Amino acid sequence: MDNVREEVQESAVKRIGVLTSGGDAPGMNAAIRSVVRSAFRRGIECVGIRRGWAGLISGDIFPMTSGDVSRIINRGGTVLYTARSEEFRTEAGLEKAAATCKLLGLDGVVAIGGDGTFRGARALSAYGVSVVGIPGTIDNDIVCTDYTIGFDTAANTAVECIDRLRDTMQSHERCAVVEVMGRHAGYLALHVGVAVGATAVLVPEHPYDFQAHVAEKIRRARLGGKTNFIIVAAEGAVSAFTVGEQIRTELGLDPRVTILGHIQRGGAPTVKDRVMATRMGYEAVRVLAEGRTNRVICAAGESIIDRDITEGLAMRKTLNPEEFKVMTVMTGT
Ligand code: F6P
């Protein structure tokens, strides 16, 4: 508390904005709440920016007080709405956004979203606006952070749905092909696949091979006595319908295909997402209050740190090799 008071006195930052951009993720509201309340504790005014970068371009903003963020820590989605802005990718769009910041006296902006959001933040910082990013996406695919807000909730939602599917697959001795989100990344599919005890897990990081990744695993499971099978596919690996068709024609089974889709993006955030979002929101405000810019808040093991956005975006992230190995052992190869 004393530390916070000291920083209040030192900080030249008087007003900041907060926005959510890109695909929403459970826990974004908890992050917004944390930003508003952390700012308030430092004597910094906070304004909400609606619809991501588009709202900064059009000046769609409103003051947010501590009371305005009551009872949102447990709500899915984002009270600030979210959008993807093509205009913000242009020089004219960036200039308009920077002009809004100047007009409204915004000393900084906290942008909650995925790597597209951070690329936008970096571009805006070149126009003299202080920016800090908070990673929020169910894909957990942001290279510089071990964790992104929303992943745990989405994984738990997918697991709950697949556990239900398992019941009926077991009764009918069937095969389920379940598509989970992850256009470019297999973190969610891998995590969920391990958690449900999937027969096979398909991720975009490994080129799809029906015989090796599906047929052989179903055969082995069948030889081991199993009569129901769960195949978890990330949407970016292969279409679940393609896999289902191949299982039908090549293995003679009668599979059922389920696309979990946007169900995975909704719902009340888990404890992990609420806590991570709250910690990250606090750090984002601290970084801005210290007069720093072009930073992204990252989970590094059990700690929350900040990195330079440009350096963060240049880092490489691969699927956790240990988790992938465990999955291959559990699925019989
Ligand atoms: O939030 C990330 C993500 O869930 C991807 O896995 C998915 O491909 C994409 O968003 C779909 O988002 P939208 O339907 O909003 O374009």
Image (cartoon, rainbow, N blue to C red):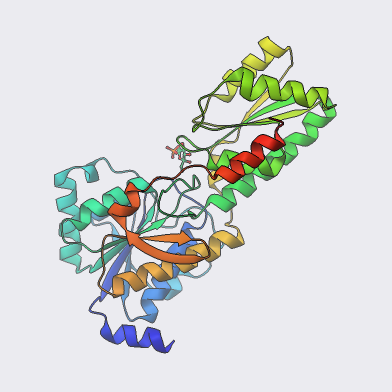
Position of 107 compared to 20: left or right? Answer: left
Residue at image position (22%, 51%) is: 123
Q: How many marks?
A: 0
Vertical relation: 14 (above or below) 21? below
Observer able to see residue 73? no
Which of these two is toward me, 325 or 83? 325
Vertical relation: 131 (above or below) 257? below
Q: Quadrant of the N terminus?
A: bottom left
Which of these two is toward me, 199 or 319? 319
Image coordinates for residue 196, horizontal then vertical, percent: 70, 41
Q: Quadrant of the C terminus?
A: top right
Which of these two is toward me, 17 or 198? 198
Observer able to see residue 271? yes
Image coordinates for residue 25, horizontal then vertical, percent: 49, 50
Vertical relation: 324 (above or below) 270? above
Residue at image position (44%, 55%) is: 145
Quarter of the render that holds ligand 1: top left
Image coordinates for residue 280, horizontal then vertical, percent: 44, 65
Which of these two is toward me, 269 or 67? 269
Image coordinates for residue 306, horizontal then vertical, percent: 37, 64
Residue at image position (47%, 60%) is: 299
Quarter holding residue 258: top right
Q: Residue furthest bottom?
A: 2
